[in-house]
Image (tube, grey):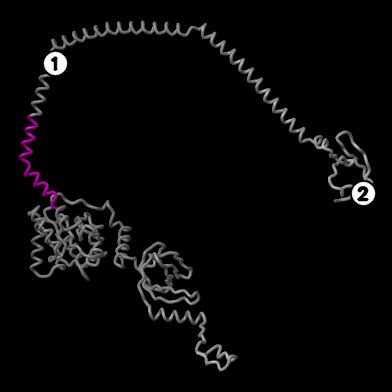
Amino acid sequence: MGKQPKSQWDFGELFPTEATRKVLSVSELTAQVKRLLEKQVGSVWVGGEITNLRAQSSGHIYFMLKDAGAQLSCVLFRGEAVMNRSVLQDGQKVLLQGDVTVYEARGQYQLIVHAVELQGVGALQIAFDKLKQKLAAEGLFAPERKRSLPDYPQRIGLVTSPTGAAIRDVLHVVQRRNPGLEVILAPCRVQGEGAAVEIAAAIRLLNEFNVGVQASACLEGEEDRSKLKLELQQGGLDLILITRGGGSLEDLWAFNEEAVARAIFESAVPVVSAIGHEIDFTISDFVADVRAATPSAAAEIITEGVFASREFVAEAPALLRRKIRQRLESAMEDFEQFRSRLARLHPRRRLNEALQRLDDLQTDLLRCTKHGTHERAVAWRNLTDRLLRIRPAQLLHQRRESLVLSRRRLHELAQLHFRNWQNRFGAIASRLRLLGPEQVLTRGYSITMDAASGRVLRDAQMVQSGQRLRTRLQAGEVLSRAERGKAK
């Protein structure tokens, strides 16, 4: 506050030092805001939709990230090692990781992008899509390479964890529907690091088992080798089932590895894939010959032939009795038809039917003759009545009267139109007379014209001294010479 005034002329300190303002330049203020943003906000993850994407020739990419209420400027520099540059497209929803800063030249805050992910999908889903596109281009998903499953499998290979819920579900369904089905288990891990390698190795081991090659390198211990030799002597595999229970995308990721897909593709034995629940799809499902929604559904598909045959065998005696009864009933019907046909084909029967037919034709002929004669008589009477009603002489007389009447009406209409045009002509002539200059002259006015050219003079300045004039009155004209012109 300024000091107190000592007199009425002492106004005190007009600009006290306490009220002096600190003025910043635009650059200083922008620099402060930049330091504050980089310190308080720093590196963040931001989600939104890409718009106004612009890729410069320098390699830098500029775009806006927006949501329903705001938008954010973003820049991805050429030198940033970002894996998913290709997903940056207008309209794409993404998650961006970067540093919040201020571009001082425009005073605009922006995000310098260091990482890009599809929103709600993540890096695993991106890797899944890329591998899916790659394998599809190579033909691993082609429908024409899919093999059909045998109707009555006797031995199958099972690739799964020996401690998981999937193996219990499969064995339970197999025991219930086809107890005689032999299952060869190739145990492996189905989750975690290294699981994909074990799954691929188990598939190849079962293929070697199928062709009778002893894969001792894949087994451990003399006991396992002896078991494998015994099983090789008993026959090969009809199909291979790869299965595990449900889980997240991370839990099922081993079945999305390229090594597992290649092993399934190279398998000489048809492969059934049953990974997770109904909504779960893996790369293995696309490569396999048959995909089942769940492990239990896979076991039902594998045992369907035997299970359906078992029901058929159980119903066979009743079906056989029903077929024999139907065959006997059909034979009896055929016998009755032959007997009836023989009776119909007897010569006396056919002669009587021919005589009866002859009587019917004679009766129909008489009826048709009478009917035709009656129709012709009715038609003749109708024609006679029509001729009498028409009466040509009377019709000619009516037409002549109509012609005379039309001629009279035409003459009357012509006279009427002539009178109307005559009246209109008279009215127009009267209007012309009223508007003509003669009517103006009768009221005492006159028209002055140049005697030489006949031009009407309307302004006194147009008249020159000595000019000959001709004035038209109501009756006659007056010739004169002007002394001088004078305007009003």
The answer to whether 75 appears left or right of 471 in the picture is: left
Where, by quadrant of the figure, is residue 124 drawn? bottom left
**Residue at (41% x, 67% y) in the render:** 70
Where, by quadrant of the figure, is residue 109 drawn? bottom left
Q: In what element is the residue under mark 1?
A: helix
Earlier along the polypeptide chain: callout 2 or callout 1? Answer: 1
Q: Which residues are magenta?
A: 302-328
Extreme bottom residue here? 6
Which residue in the protein does label 1 denote? 344
Q: What distance separates the C-alpha of mark 2 from that of mark 1?
A: 143 Å
The answer to whether 339 appears left or right of 283 in the picture is: left
Q: How far from the left and from the top, in percent, is residue 444?
A: 84, 38
The answer to whether residue 271 is visible is no
Is 133 placed above or below 483 here?
A: below
User: What amino acid does circle 2 point to?
Assistant: Arg
Towards the viewer: 391 or 119: 391
**Residue at (16% x, 55% y) in the render:** 297
Which residue in the protein does label 2 denote? 484
As drawn, the label of residue 55 is none
Q: In what element is the residue under mark 2?
A: loop
Is 314 magenta? The answer is yes
Is 302 placed above or below 7 here?
A: above
Q: How far from the left and from the top, in percent, is residue 143?
A: 27, 52
User: What amino acid does circle 1 point to?
Assistant: Arg
The answer to whether 442 appears left or right of 314 in the picture is: right
